[in-house]
Image (spheres, helix red, strand yellow):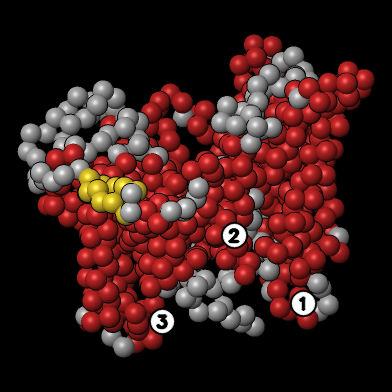
Amino acid sequence: MGTAQFIQNFLNGISIGSVYAIFALGYTLVFSILGIINFAHGAVFTLGAYFTYTLTVGQFGINGLLAGLTIDNHLPFYLAIIIGSTLAGLVGVLLERLAFKPLRSRGGDQLLALVSSLGVALVLVNAIQYLVGAEIYTFPAEVYGTMKPAIMFKVGEQPVVIRTVQVIIFAVCMFVLAILGFLISRTRIGKALQAVAENQATASLLGINVDRIILFTFFLSGFLGGMAGTLVGTSFGIAGPYFGVTYGLKGLAVIVLGGLGSIPGAVLGGMVIGLAEAFVPADYSAYKEAVAFAFLFIILLLRPQGLLGRPMIQKV
Amino acid sequence: MEEFLQNSGFLIVTMVQQSLLAMSLYYPLMAGQLSLASPGFYALGGYTAAIIGTHEFFTPLRESIGWLAFPLEWLVAGVLSAILALIVGIPALRLRGIYLALATIAFVEILRVLCLNLTITGGAIGIFDVPQLFESRWSYIWIFGPLLVMMLFFSYRLEKSRTGRAFQAIREDELAADSMGINPTRYKVLAFVIGAVLAGIVGAMSAPFLNTWNARQGTFDASIAYLAYVLIGGSRSIWGPLLGGAMLSALPEVLRPLKDSRLIINGLVLVFASIYMPKGIAGVISRLKRSLTWKSRKNGGEA
């Protein structure tokens, strides 16, 4: 592999890796608070992409209930992605209220949370299909304004091509990560979130409204998921209602690799898996989809707590 | 009757088949292990049958033993599943709870990507024209039915045996079981292998039943479907996976008149069932039974 090829793969890797990171953060935030995995996160990712698409493009295909509908009010993309992700965050809140809270208050088996969140995922994905069909929707190139579609430079004799979308995705993700880092470590609500993650009972004794923190966490989680969905959508298009499923599963690999419940771990895990996928040789590109799961399997065998996670304690 | 079997035969056999797959997830759960690996072994079994049934390498074998090729396929699928389950299970079963579930999800996905790309598994297209054991779909009940009865009897015996009690002890408290002289790893691997072998055999029976086999047979969606069967049916009794598998696999068919929205309803059923029936359908039935006997006893006392 030449230097140019190396740089190309590296840049591709950190761009997709940064999306994996913010998507996985949504999983890990909920896990750190409730100790469960929200299997509807992939569906929220999908939903976020559709929300933003509706707000900024608003043109539907020939299938589903909304077939042929065209919305004339187009929001600029930067507004649409914020509102779209916020809506996805609200879906996260709804999810907590409908699928998780009733189970918690009844003291049900934790495994059931898995099934009920999957039930919600099934509802969301099929509701999308019901409304807009299983078509591919693509964002037009203009969503990012009038920029060149790609940047090209040369390393020695070899060209390296970066799509503008990739740069924007990376920049947006870094920006979101910075804000999130500030929110969690520097603000009152962030500290409350950390306290609840550490110990719910103690946190509530200290006067923290645990229920509200849980809702806030689901909002953040949904917001991040929706934003990741939109970013992937602008890069590769929205490949139908099921396009979040693969990302949903890869996100699991990311959080386990980084350490379940660890926020820096989710970022590291996302980058590692993004890079590893980018460096799969072209001859074996068909096996790219298995890379994340190979990582997941191996890390579970060698270091189940993940790269940055705390070791599990066996309690008697 | 003939017409009914023509129309509903496929659905009834599918219900039995799905119940069996739900059971394959129930055995590890008996020992407290949440494994989602069943679709992987199911796919492996199906590919085994499809390859033995169609590959030219096995033509002389097929011609010399005739219909005996089918039981041979089941046997090979069972043995292969057991070997793979040992290879995957021994390291993976050191993990607990959600970690084991995630490891098995990874296993299923890796296997799926492999099957999607290897030549012997027919790549993305899969394997077509798998030889049929019977002429009609309905007749497959004669293999799935006896297997179901056998497994029910086996489970009943297992629960009463030393091994079954060891499973339950590990499920309730692994450390306590360990200190009582039960080797948790051995029993956990055993439970995992039993489930894997069952899933493999069901796969080997299903490839002829479905006529074609491809990588879509062993996916994450299937893992979750089987888990939903067990949890909604009831994970504490062998009747749970049976009821859950039969009812939930029939649900999309029952809801077919609703067309596009049927999967939405299906999802809602999962949400409500997990909230309002935490012990599953089997739990609801045993509660009803208990309250009925309690009432009749009370009435008897008054009389």
| Crowding at mark 2 (Cα within 10 Å: few <14, some 14-19, many 20+) | many
Q: Which mark is on residue A198?
A: 3
Chain at tag 1: B
The three-letter amino acid code for the residue at tag 1 is: Asp
Query: Left of B178 or right of it: where is A116?
Result: left
Work out which residue is located at the far right of the displayed protein and give it: B64
Q: Which mark is on residue A259?
A: none
Per the image, label 3 sits on a secondary structure element best described as: helix
Q: Residue at x 13, y 46 (%)?
A: A147
Q: Considering only order in the chain, which callout, 2 or 3, is on the residue closer to the N terminus?
A: 3
Q: For residue B122, which quarter of the picture?
A: top right
To the question of a shared chain for discs 3 and 2, the answer is yes
To the question of a shared chain for discs 1 and 3, the answer is no
Can you tell which of label 2 and label 1 is closer to the viewer? 2
Instruction: Locate residue A265, reporting x and y percent.
Output: 42, 71
The three-letter amino acid code for the residue at tag 2 is: Phe
Return the residue at label 2: A297
Q: Quadrant of the C terminus of chain B?
A: bottom right
Q: Residue at x 92, y 20 (%)?
A: B64
Instruction: Locate residue B15, reporting x and y percent.
Output: 64, 33
Q: CA distance from mark 1 to mark 3?
A: 30 Å
Return the residue at label 1: B178
